[in-house]
Image: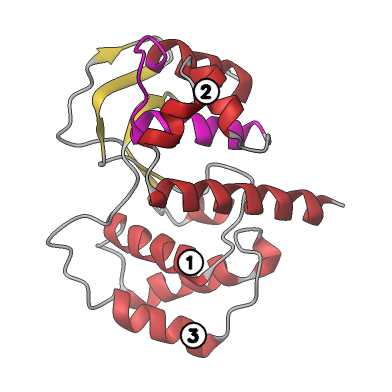
Amino acid sequence: MDFLHRNRIIYKRMPVTDIPTETYDWGWYYENGTSEFYSLFNTKVRINSYKSLKWHIIVLRYLNMSIEPQKFYTLCEYIIDQNNGFITFSVSVGILHNILAEVLEIEFHNPPNTRVRKIIFKDGIGLSAVDKLKIVGSVIGRKKNATNFDIYESMLYLHHQRQKITMRKIAGYLNVSERTLYRNMDNDLKVEKKILNEALQQGELFAL
């Protein structure tokens, strides 16, 4: 992360036009969710697929449009160097060139896709992943239903707590039945659940 800071690389951005429904000491709650929040490299889980790599490069470009192409290329070279801890697999120079050639042509009439978030925590508030998960459950769990947004929030904080994501755990934190989760959970979220669990498993294997 020192490299990003030294080179003034933007890798996090708060919502620009979306207004929080409620503001707390620990952060913000968006009842209808916000898709304007970007926060890269905020967990120990590393980039583990070409799809994820391309998305990270697209978001970095979107957040750092003023960077010259050569400097941006140097940034991407740093990201794909496994020794720097951002990625789990080797990426050839040719593949990086192909990704960058495509990304640098994007004009960004619309911002890059990102998961809608309902809860955003402030930096440096000293809350553990367990504390955050309790807040997610208490704020979102006030309702007797669970949207995809709510389920995703709980999945993220279970993941950050380095717990395997299960329907039973999500239901417990959101105070809803597992049947409700199965009814409301779309296919994309089911895939995301699998990816997060696989990434967690890889992280544990790398730690051995």
For label 1, the residue is 53
- Report how far apart the C-alphas of labels 2 and 1 lie in the structure: 31 Å
Residue 132 in sight:
no
- Report how far apart the C-alphas of labels 3 and 1 lie in the structure: 11 Å
Q: Neighbour class for label 3 at 10 Å: few (<14), some, many (≥20)?
A: few
The structure residue drawn at horizontal position 68% and vertical position 34%, both measured from the top left corner, is 163
- Residue 151 place in picture, x, y as percent: 43, 32
For label 3, the residue is 95
Query: Magenta: predominant secondary structure element?
Result: helix
Q: Earlier in the sequence, mark 2 or mark 1?
A: 1
Q: Earlier in the sequence, mark 3 or mark 1?
A: 1
Q: Is residue 46 depicted above or below 141 in this figure? A: below
Per the image, label 2 sits on a secondary structure element best described as helix
Please, what is the three-letter code of the amino acid marked with disc 1? Leu
Per the image, label 3 sits on a secondary structure element best described as helix
Please, what is the three-letter code of the amino acid marked with disc 3? Ile
In the image, 182 versus 74, the foreground residue is 182
Q: For the magenta stretch, what is the residue range?
A: 140-161
- Is residue 146 located in the magenta-colored stretch of the structure? yes
Q: Neighbour class for label 1 at 10 Å: few (<14), some, many (≥20)?
A: many
Q: Residue furthest right?
A: 208
Per the image, label 1 sits on a secondary structure element best described as helix
- Residue 142 place in picture, x, y as percent: 37, 9
- Is residue 38 located in the magenta-colored stretch of the structure? no
Q: Is residue 182 depicted above or below 144 in this figure? A: below
Disc nearest the viewer among 2 and 1: 2
Disc nearest the viewer among 3 and 2: 2
- Residue 160 place in picture, x, y as percent: 60, 35
Res. 171 mark: 2
Count of all numbered marks drawn on residues in the image: 3
Please, what is the three-letter code of the amino acid marked with disc 2? Ala
In the image, 89 versus 67, the foreground residue is 89
